[in-house]
Amino acid sequence: MDKLNQEQREALAAEGDVLVVACPGSGKTHTLIHKIAAELSQVTSHREFVVALTYTHIAAEEIRDRIEAMGVDISQLWVGTIHSFCFTWILRPYSIYHENLRDGFSVVDTFESEELLKEIAKRHPPLRSQYDCKYHATDRGFSPDRGIPSANIIAVQSSIAEYHERLLEQKKIDFEMMLKFAHDLIIEHRPIAKRLSKLFRVIAIDEYQDTRDIQYSIISRIIREKECKTKLFIVGDPNQAIFGSLGGVARTADEISALIGRPVKQLTLKNNYRSSQHIVDYFSHFAVNPLQIQATGQHRERHGDLVHDTTIDKSGLVQAISQLIRHNVEVLGIPPEQICIVAPWWIHLASITRSLVQALPEYDFNGPGLSPFAENRDNFWYKVARLALTDSAPDLFRQRIRWAREVLDELAKAGHVHDLSPRDFLKVTNGIQVRASRGTEYLAEYFDNLSRSFNLAIRPDSELSIQRQGFFDRTSNRIARIHKEESINVDDIETFRAVFRPRTGIVISTIHGVKGAEFDSVIAFGLLEGLVPHFGEPAHKKLDSAKKLMFVIGSRARLNLYLISETGRGRPGYPRYQSNVLRSLATYDYSSRSIVDPSLR
C-alpha cells in the first residue's frame, strides 16, 4: 500500500460496503486494483471468488493485466462486463429454469442482430433502420432508448417484439435479452442468489455511474440474501454519468443502501493527478455534483492553452484543427499520440477525418471509426483474429495467453476439446504462415490453417460457422462503408494489425468513446445546442446532460484544451448555436477566444 495516498488508503481500509466517489485523474482504477489484490490475498478456498464488474471489455483486460503484473494469483478473480457476468454466473448454469432458455440458447452475433433488426424496422414505418429502434432492458421489460421521437414509439415497440420473437424461434438472445432473462432468473429463483452470495467474497463495481437499474437490481438481489457475506466496493464519478440515454444512473449511497438493505459508507477521492489546476478549475464549473477537486500531480502549476472559439465556420474546421495539431507538435512539443480530437457524434468525426488525413499526411490518425472491425468482441473469430494479428512479443505475452485461453474455452463449449494448454496453443498458432496481403484474405487463410492444425471439423450449420460468416460480413460491410465515406482503403494487413497495437497517432473519438482516457491536449468541436446536449434529451435534463458531457471533455486534458463551437451547422433556416452551457461561461477568462490567434500559429 506504499503507492497509495491517504484518501486511497482509507478507501481500502474501510469495512463493509463502500462507495468511492472519485474525481477525474484521482487514481480510481489504481485504488480499485489494490482493493481487488488485497481481497484476493484473503481468499482461502477455490470456491471463493473476487468479482470485478467493468463497463467495457477493454477496462476488464486492463484490470486483469495490472493485477497479474503485480504478481498476484488471479485464479480466483473473475472480471468482466455485467453482460458477461450474467452469462457466466446466471444464464449458463441456470438456463433450465427459464422458459425461453431451457431448450438451449446462444448469444446472437452483433452483425446478425443488427441485420435482423434492420429488416424488421423497414417494415414498420416511419422507421428506416436498426438505429431508429435502439432499446435497453429494464426490470419491467424492454424500453426504447431516450431520444427516440414519441411518434415512433409504437413502431419501435412493435419492431422490438417481432425481433425478440424471431430470435427466440432460433434459440438466440442478444445482450439486452441477456440482462432481462438473468434478472428474471435471479428474482424468481431464490436459490440462485443464495448460492452466489456464498461464492463471492467481494463484488467490485467500476464506473458505477453508468450502471442501470436492472443491473443494480441483479447485484442487490445477491447482497440482500440472508447471511450474505459478500461485500460491495463501488467506484465512479456521478459527474461523468453520460450514458443516461441507455438507462445509466448514479445512485447515491443512501439509495444503494436501501437497495441492498445494509449501510453503505461513502468516501471521496479529490486529488487529481492528471491535469493542471488551470484545467481543473475550468471543468469543475460543469460539475453537477460539486466536489472540491485539487490538482496534485506533476502538471498542477502548468498554465497551458484554454481556448473557446465561436467564430470558425464549419468550412474552416479542417484548417483550424490542422493548425492546432501543428502548433501542439511543432511548438509545444506534444507527441501526436497525446492529442485527441473529440466531437459529439461519429458522423461529424467521419466527415472530417478524410480531410485531416489529406491535410496532414505526415501524421497518423487512430480511432475506432477507421478500424475495419466493428465492436464484435464476443464473436469467436474476432478472438482468433487477435492472435492472428499480433506478434509473439514479450510485452504481449500475458495478454496473448489470456486470449488463447478464451479461444480454447470457446472451442471446448462447441465440442472441440483439445488437451492443450494456452501456451502450447500459442506455439501452434505462432507457426501458422500466411502470405496474403489483404486483411480479409489474410484472416480467411489464417482461420483455414488454424482449423486444419487442430482438425476442427466445423459443420456449415454450426454456431462457429455462423459466427465466421457474420464476422466477415460485418468486416466487409465496414470496409466498404469506410471506403465509400472516407475514400480510404483499410482492407490491408497492416491496417488490420494496427487495431491491436498500442495506441499510435492522433486519437479521434466521440465524447462517449473518450471517457476514461487522458491526453496532453484535447481538441473538441461540435459543441452546439442539440448536440451538447443531444436534441432528444428531455427539457428538464438538458442542462445536466450538457454539463456532464463538458465535464468529460475538459477532464480528459492534462495541459491544453481547445473548444470549438463552430458556425454553419444545422438545416437551412435552423442554424445550430453554441451550447447554452458554454454560453453561460461567456465571460470566462480563457487564454484566447480564437483558435487562429497569432500565438497559436
Image (cartoon, rainbow, N blue to C red):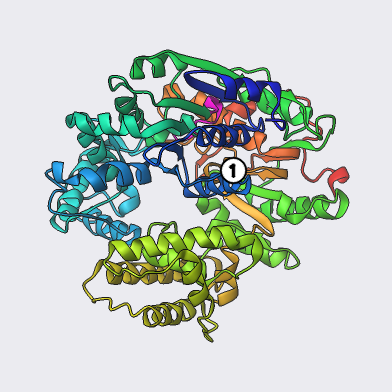
Residue 394 appears left or right of 443? right
The residue segment tinted magenta is 236-243
Check residue 490 for magenta coloring: no
Question: Which amino acid is tagged 1?
Answer: Gly
> Which residue is at the front of the view, 460 or 568?
460
Seen in the picture, residue 448 relative to 334 is either above or below; the reply is: below
Residue in the image at 53% along x and 58% along y? 369
Q: Residues within 10 Å of mark 1 (few under 14, many from 20)?
A: many
Seen in the picture, residue 565 relative to 456 is either above or below; the reply is: above
Where is residue 299 drawn, in percent x and y? Answer: 81, 35
In what element is the residue under mark 1? loop
Q: Quadrant of residue 257?
A: top left
Which residue position is annotated with label 1?
A: 526
Where is residue 438 drawn, in percent x and y? Answer: 52, 80
Residue 311 appears left or right of 43? right
Where is residue 411 drawn, in percent x and y? Answer: 33, 66
Q: Quadrant of residue 352?
A: bottom right
Seen in the picture, residue 402 relative to 206 is either above or below; the reply is: below
- Is residue 484 visible in the rendered image? The answer is no
Q: Quadrant of residue 476?
A: bottom left
> Which residue is at the front of the view, 332 or 185?
185
